[in-house]
Amino acid sequence: MSKVKGLRILASTLVALAAGAGALVPRSAQAANKLVIGISTDAGYPARAIEVIGVYQKAKTNPNVKVIEQNADNDSSKQIQQIKSMVDQGVNAIVVCAVDMNAIKTALDYAQQKKVIVTLYDRFVDHPAVKFVGGYDSYNDGVMSGEAIKGFNDGKEHVVFELVGNLADTNALARRDGFHKITDTLPNLKVVQIQTDWSTDKALSGMENALQKYPDVWAIFNASSHMDGSITTALKEAGRLKKRGEPGHVVLVSLGGEPPGMQTALDGYTDVFMVIPFDEMGGQVYDAIVKLASGQQPASDKYYCKTFPVKGEDVEKRKEEIFAWKYRDMLSK
Amino acid sequence: MINGTETSPTQTAGPQHASARHPRGGAQKLISAIARNPIAFMLIAVWLLFPLLNPMFLTGNNIVTLLVANAFFAVAAVGETFVLMTGGIDLSVAQNLTCSAMFSALVMISYQTRVVNAVLNPGAKLLSLYELRSLPGMTPRLLENALSASSGTAILIGTVVAILVGLLFGIINGVAVGFFRMSPFIVTLGTQLLARGMSYVLSNGHSISGTPRALTNMSISSGIPITSELILPWVVILMVALFVVFGIVLQKTNWGRYITLAGSNSESARYVGIRVSLVIFSVYAVAGALAGVGGLMSIMCLGTADPKVGDPLLLPIIGSVILGGISTMGGEGSITKATLGILLFATIINGMTFLNLTLSLQQLILGSIIIIGMSLISRIGSHRT
């Protein structure tokens, strides 16, 4: 058989399959008997696993529910393809944490077109297809963190480092804005922003550079506890890593509750650990999906986890309330 | 002597003697066909395997999803094919695609902002589209209508800008490699960093949204209807058209032949009067322009210009065409081979996603397939020589 003839046959076969397959295999074949939930996560952060753990826990109790998950590895075009694939597989609902809040809209359009229930977690996207959001009030979290720093303020002139997240992430922007709502009213505090893009590498290099310029830093606000390890490493290199109560201690307010932050707090370096109970999120999203799938409306179109502050000295006592401790076995894998 | 015709024992025994020495069964023919076209057969194999593992793989919706998701990198891969056939390499193709998308998006948004301001807020200070929404008396419908009216021209301007930006990077590469005979690896590494840096400066590190809705619709809802529920989007049709056009150009034009000759033996090509420097320059320029087209298509598929879109693309672009059988030594290849490699790569990614395999397993499998594919190709190469 010549190459050209062989390729013609191949091409014809593929076109025939494509043209006929859409009519032969109904979109909802897989979903006929089950509620299928597709989770699309932006990357494999530990917090993401905790945020959706409620979906898996509740789905396990219901034999008619199946959960599938895809990790986009911080690639927005991959996430779009993954979501479209899940929709094509016949999922009834998707639970999305967007890599890029703008690019994801193409995938949400597709899901809406195919009448798939769209819910979000962690990151809010303004799109008409979205029926429910599980998240947290990042602006208020920033305000609470600012209040925590203010609680240590003695009126003297001080430098405060603020680790800022990815500026394409609405949560990062909201935390920053909330924090500045308080610190902008404290003229004696000079806030130095360190751009991290949520990266521990950038957090480390940013801290090292900032400590070169401001070796007498007084306090640090970390907008996400997963970067606490970078903070302690940089402080140690600069000879500034001191525990609470020791001379020269740098006040640390850490927002999130992730394992590195938990460890830093248990080691005695954190002054206020702002814990976002991420583990509450998934269960709320699941309940909303079940209601929407049966034609009902959930009581609210959003659920915000209520962040609570834990003083550094109380972390050991209250560790059972913190997800990084509750799920430490799962998070350590 | 039989009927007056003299025959020799050898002639009488000829055909039977030949078949006894070289048996040609169906199995051997099949093995031989596979050996000549390993990637084609790998492609058939995955298209048979994935539907067995998940029947939903073979739906029209999923096939369209597969084609749309890979359309923009596939077009850039066509340009890379030409470059590889000259014995060179273009490492800047992915970031060129990104930077072209950035410029194109910014120009389209800027144009539409000016036009919409002229219509809805004449004579006043120029407002962003976001600010226009909050103007007293402004309704979403009014704004939407004004945007729709200007989107055709905006898309045209954006297309030209994307191609020109891509072409500019291609010209830089072409001049350096073709005329100054600099190392393609080093030159294109430099332009890659240049393009990436420019993308981040233009965008401040985050994606740019607000491009015309009609452009995004070209990957979702506008195209040629196949069934009552299925559309073949324009972005796929554009991809196929470019493949066909450049396939014909490579096979049927003098330029296409010069590319092959320049890649197989540049000295011999010079002796027969081919201006090899000019051919190489033109190849890089065309590759750049195609990367620009890919950039525009990325906006169609993503709805935004994303400064990070090119980061994971270099491996699929180069890897898929080499997997298809384009020789890195130059002088050998075709758009058909590149198409097979791209289709195989895209199918494997899509299929593994469809099977909900974990990311780490996907990477393991993809790496294994690339090694197996390359081993098969190099074995065939050694048999032919």
Image: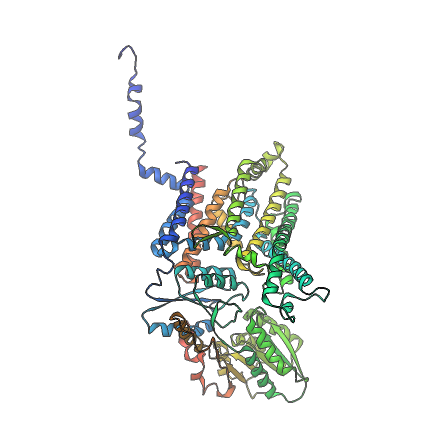
Instruction: Indicate whether B49 appears above or below B278.
Output: below
Query: Can you name the residue that lies furthest to the left here?
Result: B2
Residue B343 image position (x, y, % from top left): 46, 49
Instruction: Give the quadrant of the N terminus of chain A.
Output: top left
* Residue at screen point 70% across, 65% down: B126
Q: Quadrant of residue A87?
A: bottom left
- Counting every numbered tag in the picture gives 0
Residue B77 image position (x, y, % from top left): 53, 49
* Residue at screen point 62% across, 32% down: B271
B335 or A198: nearer the viewer: B335
Instruction: Indicate whether B229 appears above or below B174.
Output: below
Q: Decide if residue B55 is in sight here.
A: yes
A260 or B167: nearer the viewer: B167
Instruction: Give the quadrant of the C terminus of chain A.
Output: bottom left
Q: Decide if residue A239 is in sight here.
A: no
B338 or B19: nearer the viewer: B338
Query: Can you name the residue that lies furthest to the right here?
Result: B123
Give the side of residue B178 with respect to residue A18, left or right: right
Q: Quadrant of residue B283?
A: top right
A158 or A25: nearer the viewer: A25
Residue B180 image position (x, y, % from top left): 67, 44
Q: Quadrant of residue A142?
A: bottom right
Colour scheme of the rendered structure: rainbow
Residue B163 image position (x, y, % from top left): 62, 50
